[in-house]
Image (cartoon, grey):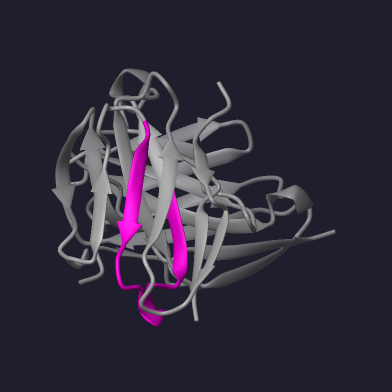
Amino acid sequence: DQQVKQNSPSLSVQEGRISILNCDYTNSMFDYFLWYKKYPAEGPTFLISISSIKDKNEDGRFTVFLNKSAKHLSLHIVPSQPGDSAVYFCAPGDSSYKLIFGSGTRLLVRP
Amino acid sequence: DTGVSQNPRHKITKRGQNVTFRCDPISEHNRLYWYRQTLGQGPEFLTYFQNEAQLEKSRLLSDRFSAERPKGSFSTLEIQRTEQGDSAMYLCASSSLLQGRSSGANVLTFGAGSRLTVL
């Protein structure tokens, strides 16, 4: 029972262009949605979040969009930089205080 | 504060042995989580504590796994009679709802993880 799906295991983008990472979920009770970034040999680090009552949240080069009716969210990175190369996880949460992680998308930003 | 600290970073053991991992959370965080991550997958929830109380355990957590947080500070995760399928990265995280960002989200801060290899 996969509540959170990231259907693209990998994505390759040219430096300076936009990176779009997608996430689909099935549980309509999620209250908020987080994105984490993970480099090799490190733990995931928090990137950006969005509440279920909003449809967009922006923080510098990172913007997250939420489409509740489609149960879909996306993370936009623009402009993409080589240092953004990492694995990105979508992680919704609810009142249970735990996060449910997707399987991740590996982003490669080519110089 | 140095963040969430996990020890050891890497443990190699033989099948059937017991192993214990330790996690030191951010000092002002009252919630502590254990997750497990295998290759190509996202972190999978195992259990979490609020202060010293273990509030939820995943049904995926077999009886061979036990976690404690005796004084509401550090936590240990013990795996008894290890099996090869236990090989994974064990991640600890902590949080405080008072530090939630603008979304009111429960943001977890993760440690670097403890990698277990069972031979």
Q: Is residue A44 above or below residue B118?
A: above
Residue in the image at 63% along x and 37% along y: A61
Residue in the image at 45% along x and 68% along y: B88
Q: Is residue B83 above or below residue A86?
A: below
Q: Which residues are magenta?
A: B74-91
- x and y percentages locating residue A65 in the rendered image: 42, 45
Residue B69 part of the magenta-drawn span? no
Direction from residue A19 to residue B53 in the image, left or right: left
Image quarter of residue B54: top left
Residue A80 seen anywhere in this rendered image of the structure: yes
Direction from residue B52 to residue A101 in the image, left or right: right
Residue in the image at 75% along x and 49% along y: A83
Residue B43 seen anywhere in this rendered image of the structure: no
Foreground pick, B14 / A3: B14
Residue in the image at 30% along x and 66% along y: B80
- x and y percentages locating residue B67 in the rendered image: 26, 49
